[in-house]
Image (cartoon, helix red, strand yellow):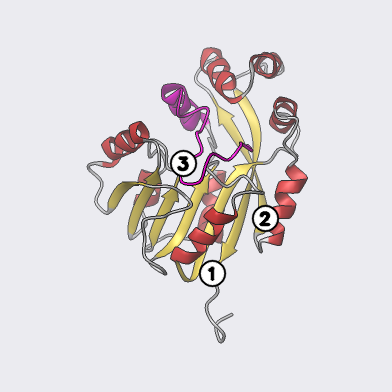
Amino acid sequence: MTRRRPPHGRPIPSPNIWHWPRIYEVENRAQDADGAIFAELRRVADWAGRDLVDVGCGTGFHLPTFAAAAGSVTGVEPHPPLVAAARARTDSLAGVRVLAGTAEALPFADRSVDVVHARTAYFFGPGCGPGIAEAMRVLRPGGVLAVVDLDATAPGYGDWMRADLPHYDPAVVEAFFAAQGFDLVRVPTRWEFEDRRALRAVLGIEFGEKIADLAFAQTPGLALDVRYRIHTRRAPRGLLGG
């Protein structure tokens, strides 16, 4: 979702995980119950045996999944409480580290990683150019920047998202990424909650009260259909490699 950009050098606050990390953990467990996003990511940005960076990793929820196949995994997160939580989550995992940092100033040398992944973090279309440039700087030739965000053009969740954020124009965001040289894949997913209370709590941190009430009333069970977009851009291999 789009947010006003703070003064240069300061991180962009995430209004859900920063303020409600426990509820966001419930959301993470519910999201993509069938693993569709990871399946598509393996196709477009395979990290097996490679060095991966997760930008805006939050509490590190996705780091263990990446670590199961990657050569190395580094989470980058600007919010100190989340950095601590991510380190605690991954403390026993070999080849995983968590660093404090921002998308605009990644703590890596030029051409030093193979995959940069960001899921609903920082990359919200117009205004995120510095983060894109920084990701491309650290990617090795042929490496991939994979940006996963919510597809507000889809019915249901997308309708609620647009109603909650009337200033957000998904067409403008998609045009921005296209102009930056990204490919786009839409990925339908299913969120599955343990009970209605958990569902309502998550809707309450994703939307304002009015839209959260509407979304809850329009969801009779424990599942939500939520579509994502995966934007990918590959670092050039050189004059001969394309």
Q: Residue furthest bottom?
A: 240
Q: Nearer the viewer, residue 136 or 34?
A: 136
Question: Would you place residue 8 above or below residue 32 in this image?
Answer: below
Q: Nearer the viewer, mark 1 or mark 3?
A: 3
Badge 3 density bin: few <14, some 14–19, many ≥20, Cα 10 Å: few
Give the image location of residue 151, x and y in percent.
68, 41
The answer to whether one can see residue 129 in this image is yes
Residue underneath mark 1: 235
Residue ID at (52%, 16%)? 195
Q: Is 158 within the magenta?
A: no
Which quarter of the image is occupied by the N terminus? Answer: top right
Give the image location of residue 202, x and y in percent.
54, 22
Inter-mark Cα distance, 2 to 1: 15 Å
Inter-mark Cα distance, 1 to 3: 27 Å
Q: Nearer the viewer, residue 174 or 63?
A: 174
Residue ID at (73%, 42%)? 170
Residue underneath mark 2: 177
Horizontal arrangement in the rendering, residue 215 relative to residue 26 (left or right):
right
Say which label, 2 or 3, has the lower sequence index. 3
Inter-mark Cα distance, 2 to 3: 23 Å
Q: Residue furthest front?
A: 7
Task: Please state which amino acid type lies under the numbered disc 3.
Answer: Arg
Task: Please state which amino acid type lies under the numbered disc 2.
Answer: Phe
Question: Would you place residue 197 above or below residue 51 in this image?
Answer: above
Give the image location of residue 215, x and y in percent.
68, 19
Horizontal arrangement in the rendering, residue 99 relative to residue 207 (left or right):
left
- Tell me which corner region of the image, top left, top right, bottom left or bottom right, holds residue 6: top right
The region drawn magenta spans 1-30
Task: Please state which amino acid type lies under the numbered disc 1.
Answer: Ala
Question: Would you place residue 1 above or below residue 175 in this image?
Answer: above
Q: Is 11 within the magenta?
A: yes
Residue 10: mark in rendering: 3
